[in-house]
Amino acid sequence: TQGKVITCKAAVAWAAKEPLVVEEIEVDPPKAGEVRIHILYTGICHTDEYTRSGNDPEGKFPAILGHEGAGIVESVGEGVTSVKPGDHVIPLYTAECRECKFCKSGKTNLCGKVRATQGQGLMPDGTSRFRARGQTVYHFMGTSTFSQYTVVADVSVVKVNDSAPFEKICLLGCGIPTAWGAVTKMPGDGVAGSNVAVFGCGCIGLGVINTARTVGASRIIAVDINPNKEAVARSFGATEFVNSKEIAQSGKRIQDYLVEITDGGPDFTFDCTGNVDVMRAALEAAHKGWGVCTVIGVAPAGAEISTRPFQLVTGRTWRGSAFGGVKGRTELPGLVDDYLAGKLEVDKYVTHSRALDEMNEGFHDLHTGDCIRCVVSM
Ligand code: AHE
Ligand code: ZN
Protein backbone atom coordinates (compact mmCIF):
# COMPACT_ATOMS: atom_id res chain seq x y z
CA THR A 1 0.00 0.00 0.00
CA GLN A 2 3.00 2.30 0.40
CA GLY A 3 2.80 5.30 -1.94
CA LYS A 4 -0.76 4.39 -2.97
CA VAL A 5 -4.16 5.82 -2.13
CA ILE A 6 -5.88 3.63 0.49
CA THR A 7 -9.63 3.06 0.44
CA CYS A 8 -10.98 2.36 3.92
CA LYS A 9 -13.84 3.12 6.27
CA ALA A 10 -14.19 6.23 8.38
CA ALA A 11 -16.90 8.00 10.36
CA VAL A 12 -17.47 11.26 8.48
CA ALA A 13 -19.00 14.34 10.09
CA TRP A 14 -20.69 15.90 7.06
CA ALA A 15 -22.20 18.85 8.89
CA ALA A 16 -22.51 20.24 12.40
CA LYS A 17 -25.19 18.65 14.60
CA GLU A 18 -25.70 15.66 12.26
CA PRO A 19 -24.88 12.08 13.18
CA LEU A 20 -21.61 10.77 11.75
CA VAL A 21 -21.82 8.60 8.63
CA VAL A 22 -19.59 5.53 8.37
CA GLU A 23 -18.53 5.17 4.77
CA GLU A 24 -15.68 4.48 2.38
CA ILE A 25 -13.12 7.21 2.06
CA GLU A 26 -9.84 7.65 0.19
CA VAL A 27 -6.65 8.43 2.09
CA ASP A 28 -3.71 9.84 0.16
CA PRO A 29 -0.16 8.65 0.84
CA PRO A 30 1.87 10.73 3.30
CA LYS A 31 3.80 13.63 1.80
CA ALA A 32 7.26 14.74 3.03
CA GLY A 33 7.33 14.95 6.82
CA GLU A 34 4.06 13.03 7.17
CA VAL A 35 3.07 9.64 8.54
CA ARG A 36 0.15 7.39 7.51
CA ILE A 37 -1.21 5.37 10.44
CA HIS A 38 -3.49 2.34 10.56
CA ILE A 39 -5.75 3.29 13.48
CA LEU A 40 -6.86 0.24 15.49
CA TYR A 41 -8.74 1.79 18.40
CA THR A 42 -10.03 5.24 19.28
CA GLY A 43 -11.71 6.71 22.31
CA ILE A 44 -14.57 9.17 22.02
CA CYS A 45 -13.96 12.38 23.97
CA HIS A 46 -16.40 15.18 24.77
CA THR A 47 -14.32 17.43 22.51
CA ASP A 48 -15.35 15.29 19.51
CA GLU A 49 -18.99 15.82 20.51
CA TYR A 50 -18.29 19.50 21.14
CA THR A 51 -17.06 19.96 17.57
CA ARG A 52 -19.78 17.71 16.07
CA SER A 53 -22.43 19.74 17.86
CA GLY A 54 -21.24 22.97 16.22
CA ASN A 55 -19.88 24.53 19.42
CA ASP A 56 -16.24 24.66 18.27
CA PRO A 57 -15.20 27.94 16.62
CA GLU A 58 -12.57 25.95 14.74
CA GLY A 59 -15.03 23.27 13.61
CA LYS A 60 -14.94 22.67 9.83
CA PHE A 61 -17.10 20.28 7.85
CA PRO A 62 -17.05 17.76 6.34
CA ALA A 63 -14.41 16.40 8.67
CA ILE A 64 -13.09 13.22 10.20
CA LEU A 65 -13.14 13.78 13.95
CA GLY A 66 -11.34 11.76 16.64
CA HIS A 67 -8.18 12.59 18.59
CA GLU A 68 -7.72 9.77 21.11
CA GLY A 69 -6.35 6.89 19.04
CA ALA A 70 -3.65 4.27 18.77
CA GLY A 71 -2.39 2.28 15.81
CA ILE A 72 0.48 1.11 13.63
CA VAL A 73 2.52 3.16 11.16
CA GLU A 74 1.63 1.99 7.62
CA SER A 75 4.06 4.21 5.71
CA VAL A 76 6.06 7.40 6.05
CA GLY A 77 6.77 10.28 3.71
CA GLU A 78 10.12 11.60 2.58
CA GLY A 79 12.49 12.67 5.33
CA VAL A 80 10.64 11.04 8.23
CA THR A 81 13.08 9.46 10.69
CA SER A 82 11.25 9.51 14.04
CA VAL A 83 8.94 6.58 13.20
CA LYS A 84 8.91 3.75 10.65
CA PRO A 85 6.35 1.31 9.24
CA GLY A 86 5.29 -1.22 11.89
CA ASP A 87 5.86 1.10 14.85
CA HIS A 88 3.07 1.19 17.43
CA VAL A 89 2.08 4.81 17.82
CA ILE A 90 -0.23 7.36 19.40
CA PRO A 91 -1.21 10.45 17.34
CA LEU A 92 -0.73 13.77 19.15
CA TYR A 93 -3.12 16.69 18.91
CA THR A 94 -0.50 18.70 20.75
CA ALA A 95 2.55 18.34 18.52
CA GLU A 96 6.15 18.51 19.72
CA CYS A 97 8.65 19.74 17.11
CA ARG A 98 11.46 20.56 19.56
CA GLU A 99 12.47 23.49 17.32
CA CYS A 100 9.89 26.25 17.72
CA LYS A 101 9.90 29.06 20.29
CA PHE A 102 7.34 27.22 22.42
CA CYS A 103 9.16 23.89 22.41
CA LYS A 104 12.51 25.51 23.11
CA SER A 105 11.15 27.67 25.94
CA GLY A 106 11.00 24.74 28.34
CA LYS A 107 7.88 26.40 29.75
CA THR A 108 5.02 24.86 27.78
CA ASN A 109 3.91 21.87 25.73
CA LEU A 110 2.08 24.10 23.23
CA CYS A 111 4.14 23.52 20.07
CA GLY A 112 3.66 26.12 17.34
CA LYS A 113 4.94 24.16 14.35
CA VAL A 114 1.68 22.85 12.88
CA ARG A 115 -0.96 24.55 15.05
CA ALA A 116 -2.18 27.07 12.45
CA THR A 117 -2.95 24.54 9.71
CA GLN A 118 -4.22 22.04 12.29
CA GLY A 119 -6.84 24.59 13.35
CA GLN A 120 -7.91 24.90 9.70
CA GLY A 121 -8.37 21.15 9.36
CA LEU A 122 -5.42 20.84 6.99
CA MET A 123 -2.00 19.24 6.80
CA PRO A 124 1.00 21.58 7.18
CA ASP A 125 1.17 22.16 3.39
CA GLY A 126 -2.39 23.52 3.49
CA THR A 127 -4.13 20.53 1.85
CA SER A 128 -6.12 17.48 3.01
CA ARG A 129 -5.33 13.78 2.53
CA PHE A 130 -9.00 12.70 2.80
CA ARG A 131 -11.79 12.39 0.22
CA ALA A 132 -15.30 10.98 0.50
CA ARG A 133 -17.96 10.89 -2.25
CA GLY A 134 -15.52 12.83 -4.43
CA GLN A 135 -15.39 15.69 -1.93
CA THR A 136 -12.42 16.90 0.09
CA VAL A 137 -12.81 16.10 3.80
CA TYR A 138 -11.05 18.11 6.51
CA HIS A 139 -8.68 16.74 9.16
CA PHE A 140 -9.41 17.39 12.86
CA MET A 141 -6.97 18.30 15.65
CA GLY A 142 -4.15 17.00 13.45
CA THR A 143 -5.21 13.42 14.23
CA SER A 144 -8.59 12.32 12.71
CA THR A 145 -8.62 8.98 14.50
CA PHE A 146 -12.21 8.10 13.42
CA SER A 147 -10.68 6.67 10.23
CA GLN A 148 -9.09 3.26 9.69
CA TYR A 149 -6.19 5.14 8.10
CA THR A 150 -5.14 8.68 8.88
CA VAL A 151 -2.25 10.96 7.95
CA VAL A 152 -0.49 13.14 10.54
CA ALA A 153 2.60 15.35 10.68
CA ASP A 154 5.71 13.56 11.95
CA VAL A 155 5.84 15.98 14.89
CA SER A 156 2.31 14.84 15.79
CA VAL A 157 2.98 11.16 16.48
CA VAL A 158 4.96 9.18 19.04
CA LYS A 159 6.20 5.60 19.05
CA VAL A 160 5.36 3.65 22.21
CA ASN A 161 6.08 0.23 23.71
CA ASP A 162 4.75 -2.39 21.29
CA SER A 163 3.58 -4.76 24.02
CA ALA A 164 0.91 -2.29 25.16
CA PRO A 165 -2.74 -3.08 24.24
CA PHE A 166 -4.04 -0.58 21.68
CA GLU A 167 -7.58 -0.75 23.07
CA LYS A 168 -6.31 0.75 26.33
CA ILE A 169 -3.42 3.04 25.40
CA CYS A 170 -5.59 4.97 22.96
CA LEU A 171 -6.73 6.82 26.11
CA LEU A 172 -3.21 8.21 26.39
CA GLY A 173 -4.06 10.25 23.29
CA CYS A 174 -6.14 12.65 25.38
CA GLY A 175 -7.98 11.89 28.61
CA ILE A 176 -5.35 10.33 30.81
CA PRO A 177 -2.39 12.67 30.18
CA THR A 178 -4.73 15.68 30.31
CA ALA A 179 -5.79 14.77 33.84
CA TRP A 180 -2.42 13.42 35.00
CA GLY A 181 -0.44 16.45 33.82
CA ALA A 182 -2.92 19.01 35.18
CA VAL A 183 -2.12 17.68 38.66
CA THR A 184 1.53 16.62 38.41
CA LYS A 185 2.74 19.69 36.54
CA MET A 186 1.30 22.16 39.02
CA PRO A 187 3.71 25.08 39.49
CA GLY A 188 5.04 25.49 43.01
CA ASP A 189 5.21 22.80 45.63
CA GLY A 190 2.56 20.56 44.10
CA VAL A 191 -0.61 19.03 45.51
CA ALA A 192 0.88 16.46 47.91
CA GLY A 193 -0.60 16.93 51.39
CA SER A 194 -3.12 19.54 50.31
CA ASN A 195 -6.91 19.76 49.96
CA VAL A 196 -8.33 19.43 46.47
CA ALA A 197 -11.78 19.97 44.94
CA VAL A 198 -12.61 18.52 41.55
CA PHE A 199 -15.65 19.85 39.66
CA GLY A 200 -17.07 17.28 37.25
CA CYS A 201 -16.62 13.51 37.50
CA GLY A 202 -16.23 12.50 33.87
CA CYS A 203 -13.05 10.96 32.49
CA ILE A 204 -10.98 14.07 33.20
CA GLY A 205 -12.37 14.71 36.69
CA LEU A 206 -11.87 11.07 37.70
CA GLY A 207 -8.33 11.20 36.27
CA VAL A 208 -7.61 14.32 38.34
CA ILE A 209 -9.00 12.61 41.45
CA ASN A 210 -6.93 9.49 40.76
CA THR A 211 -3.74 11.47 40.20
CA ALA A 212 -4.33 13.62 43.29
CA ARG A 213 -4.60 10.43 45.35
CA THR A 214 -1.46 9.00 43.73
CA VAL A 215 0.61 12.06 44.59
CA GLY A 216 -0.72 12.15 48.16
CA ALA A 217 -3.34 14.88 48.41
CA SER A 218 -5.14 14.76 51.78
CA ARG A 219 -8.78 15.67 51.19
CA ILE A 220 -10.08 15.08 47.68
CA ILE A 221 -13.59 16.51 47.30
CA ALA A 222 -15.48 15.41 44.19
CA VAL A 223 -18.24 17.76 43.05
CA ASP A 224 -20.94 16.78 40.55
CA ILE A 225 -24.65 17.30 39.91
CA ASN A 226 -25.22 13.56 39.37
CA PRO A 227 -25.52 11.64 42.67
CA ASN A 228 -24.63 8.40 40.86
CA LYS A 229 -21.09 9.77 40.49
CA GLU A 230 -20.36 9.43 44.19
CA ALA A 231 -19.48 5.74 44.11
CA VAL A 232 -17.25 5.99 41.05
CA ALA A 233 -15.53 9.15 42.36
CA ARG A 234 -14.76 7.39 45.65
CA SER A 235 -13.45 4.35 43.79
CA PHE A 236 -10.96 6.62 41.97
CA GLY A 237 -9.81 8.16 45.25
CA ALA A 238 -12.23 10.89 46.27
CA THR A 239 -12.48 11.17 50.07
CA GLU A 240 -15.72 13.17 49.92
CA PHE A 241 -18.54 13.81 47.46
CA VAL A 242 -20.61 16.96 47.22
CA ASN A 243 -23.80 17.12 45.15
CA SER A 244 -23.65 20.72 43.91
CA LYS A 245 -27.29 20.63 42.81
CA GLU A 246 -28.37 19.90 46.37
CA ILE A 247 -26.18 22.70 47.71
CA ALA A 248 -27.75 25.10 45.21
CA GLN A 249 -31.26 23.94 46.16
CA SER A 250 -30.48 24.67 49.79
CA GLY A 251 -29.85 28.27 48.74
CA LYS A 252 -26.09 28.17 49.14
CA ARG A 253 -23.41 28.82 46.54
CA ILE A 254 -21.12 25.83 46.05
CA GLN A 255 -17.99 27.98 46.50
CA ASP A 256 -19.24 29.24 49.88
CA TYR A 257 -20.06 25.70 50.96
CA LEU A 258 -16.58 24.42 50.03
CA VAL A 259 -14.89 27.35 51.80
CA GLU A 260 -16.95 26.50 54.89
CA ILE A 261 -16.13 22.78 55.04
CA THR A 262 -12.39 23.23 54.36
CA ASP A 263 -11.59 26.08 56.75
CA GLY A 264 -11.06 28.68 54.01
CA GLY A 265 -11.21 26.69 50.80
CA PRO A 266 -9.35 23.90 49.01
CA ASP A 267 -5.72 24.63 48.11
CA PHE A 268 -6.31 23.38 44.58
CA THR A 269 -9.50 23.30 42.52
CA PHE A 270 -10.03 21.87 39.04
CA ASP A 271 -12.74 22.60 36.49
CA CYS A 272 -13.42 19.43 34.51
CA THR A 273 -16.79 20.55 33.13
CA GLY A 274 -16.28 23.29 30.50
CA ASN A 275 -19.09 25.26 32.16
CA VAL A 276 -18.04 28.87 32.76
CA ASP A 277 -20.20 29.27 35.87
CA VAL A 278 -18.49 26.22 37.34
CA MET A 279 -15.09 27.74 36.42
CA ARG A 280 -16.05 30.80 38.44
CA ALA A 281 -17.16 28.73 41.40
CA ALA A 282 -13.92 26.74 41.23
CA LEU A 283 -11.82 29.91 41.31
CA GLU A 284 -13.82 31.45 44.14
CA ALA A 285 -13.72 28.25 46.18
CA ALA A 286 -9.91 28.23 46.12
CA HIS A 287 -8.23 29.29 49.37
CA LYS A 288 -7.51 32.99 49.88
CA GLY A 289 -3.83 33.84 49.62
CA TRP A 290 -2.64 30.77 47.74
CA GLY A 291 -5.48 28.77 46.16
CA VAL A 292 -4.94 27.69 42.57
CA CYS A 293 -7.79 26.93 40.17
CA THR A 294 -6.92 24.94 37.06
CA VAL A 295 -9.28 25.12 34.09
CA ILE A 296 -9.28 21.98 31.96
CA GLY A 297 -12.80 21.90 30.50
CA VAL A 298 -13.51 23.29 27.03
CA ALA A 299 -16.18 26.01 27.00
CA PRO A 300 -18.58 26.67 24.10
CA ALA A 301 -17.76 29.21 21.38
CA GLY A 302 -18.13 32.76 22.64
CA ALA A 303 -18.37 31.82 26.34
CA GLU A 304 -16.33 33.98 28.71
CA ILE A 305 -15.30 33.64 32.34
CA SER A 306 -15.78 36.31 34.95
CA THR A 307 -15.16 36.97 38.62
CA ARG A 308 -14.47 39.98 40.80
CA PRO A 309 -10.81 40.95 40.31
CA PHE A 310 -10.64 41.07 44.12
CA GLN A 311 -10.62 37.25 44.00
CA LEU A 312 -7.25 37.44 42.22
CA VAL A 313 -5.95 40.43 44.17
CA THR A 314 -6.44 38.38 47.31
CA GLY A 315 -4.13 35.69 46.13
CA ARG A 316 -6.05 33.17 44.07
CA THR A 317 -4.55 32.00 40.78
CA TRP A 318 -6.52 31.06 37.68
CA ARG A 319 -4.57 28.81 35.35
CA GLY A 320 -5.24 26.19 32.71
CA SER A 321 -3.54 23.48 30.77
CA ALA A 322 -3.96 21.73 27.44
CA PHE A 323 -3.14 18.02 27.19
CA GLY A 324 -2.07 18.40 30.84
CA GLY A 325 1.03 20.33 29.79
CA VAL A 326 2.41 16.99 28.58
CA LYS A 327 5.03 16.97 25.81
CA GLY A 328 3.76 14.04 23.79
CA ARG A 329 6.87 12.75 22.04
CA THR A 330 9.03 13.11 25.14
CA GLU A 331 6.62 11.92 27.82
CA LEU A 332 4.05 9.49 26.36
CA PRO A 333 6.46 6.54 25.99
CA GLY A 334 7.16 6.78 29.73
CA LEU A 335 3.47 6.97 30.59
CA VAL A 336 2.79 3.85 28.49
CA ASP A 337 5.62 2.07 30.32
CA ASP A 338 4.17 3.24 33.66
CA TYR A 339 0.83 1.74 32.61
CA LEU A 340 2.52 -1.57 31.71
CA ALA A 341 4.33 -1.54 35.07
CA GLY A 342 1.03 -1.09 36.91
CA LYS A 343 1.89 2.44 38.05
CA LEU A 344 -0.69 4.29 35.92
CA GLU A 345 -4.39 3.40 35.93
CA VAL A 346 -5.91 3.11 32.45
CA ASP A 347 -8.14 0.01 32.27
CA LYS A 348 -10.68 1.34 34.76
CA TYR A 349 -11.59 4.26 32.50
CA VAL A 350 -12.80 2.02 29.67
CA THR A 351 -16.45 1.35 30.51
CA HIS A 352 -17.91 0.91 27.01
CA SER A 353 -16.76 -0.73 23.77
CA ARG A 354 -18.16 -0.26 20.28
CA ALA A 355 -17.49 -1.21 16.67
CA LEU A 356 -16.87 1.48 14.05
CA ASP A 357 -20.38 0.96 12.67
CA GLU A 358 -21.73 1.91 16.11
CA MET A 359 -19.88 5.23 16.30
CA ASN A 360 -23.08 7.22 16.84
CA GLU A 361 -24.16 4.87 19.63
CA GLY A 362 -20.73 5.54 21.15
CA PHE A 363 -21.50 9.27 21.11
CA HIS A 364 -24.76 8.45 22.83
CA ASP A 365 -22.89 6.42 25.49
CA LEU A 366 -20.92 9.56 26.28
CA HIS A 367 -24.06 11.25 27.56
CA THR A 368 -25.02 8.44 29.91
CA GLY A 369 -23.86 8.98 33.46
CA ASP A 370 -22.17 5.59 33.76
CA CYS A 371 -19.83 6.05 30.79
CA ILE A 372 -16.27 7.15 31.50
CA ARG A 373 -14.81 6.26 28.12
CA CYS A 374 -16.21 4.41 25.13
CA VAL A 375 -13.47 2.80 23.04
CA VAL A 376 -14.23 2.07 19.39
CA SER A 377 -12.66 -0.85 17.54
CA MET A 378 -11.82 0.44 14.08
N1 AHE B 1 -10.85 24.59 19.15
C1 AHE B 1 -11.47 25.21 20.31
C2 AHE B 1 -10.79 24.86 21.58
C3 AHE B 1 -10.79 23.41 21.84
C4 AHE B 1 -9.78 23.11 22.93
O1 AHE B 1 -9.68 23.85 23.89
N2 AHE B 1 -9.06 22.03 22.77
C5 AHE B 1 -8.14 21.59 23.79
C6 AHE B 1 -8.08 20.12 23.72
S1 AHE B 1 -9.55 19.38 24.22
C7 AHE B 1 -9.15 17.74 24.26
O2 AHE B 1 -10.25 17.04 24.48
C8 AHE B 1 -6.72 22.04 23.56
O3 AHE B 1 -5.78 21.40 23.96
N3 AHE B 1 -6.53 23.15 22.97
C9 AHE B 1 -5.22 23.64 22.72
C10 AHE B 1 -4.98 23.71 21.27
O4 AHE B 1 -3.92 24.18 20.85
O5 AHE B 1 -5.86 23.28 20.52
C11 AHE B 1 -11.53 26.71 20.13
O6 AHE B 1 -12.05 27.39 21.05
O7 AHE B 1 -11.09 27.20 19.08
ZN1 ZN C 1 -10.14 14.93 24.18
Image: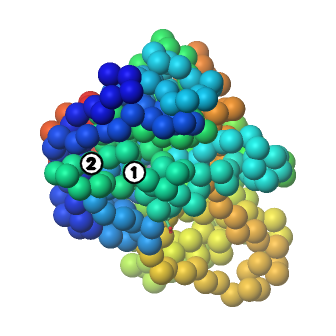
Residue placed at 31% from the left, 63% from the top?
A: 61
- Residue 190, compared with residue 244, is above or below; it is above
For badge 1, the amino acid type reads: Ser
In the rendered image, is residue 295 in sight? yes
Residue 128: mark in rendering: 1
- Quadrant housing the N terminus: top left
Whether label 2 lies within 8 Å of ligand 1 gets the answer: no
Q: Position of residue 164 (x, y in %)?
A: 47, 17
Residue placed at 74% from the left, 40% from the top?
A: 98
Residue highlighted by disc 2: 131
In the rendered image, is residue 277 in sight? no
For badge 2, the amino acid type reads: Arg
- Residue 293, compared with residue 374, is above or below; it is below
66 or 321, which lies in front?
A: 66
135 vs 334, left or right, is left
The local secondary structure at tag 2 comes to strand
Residue placed at 62% from the left, 48% from the top?
A: 324
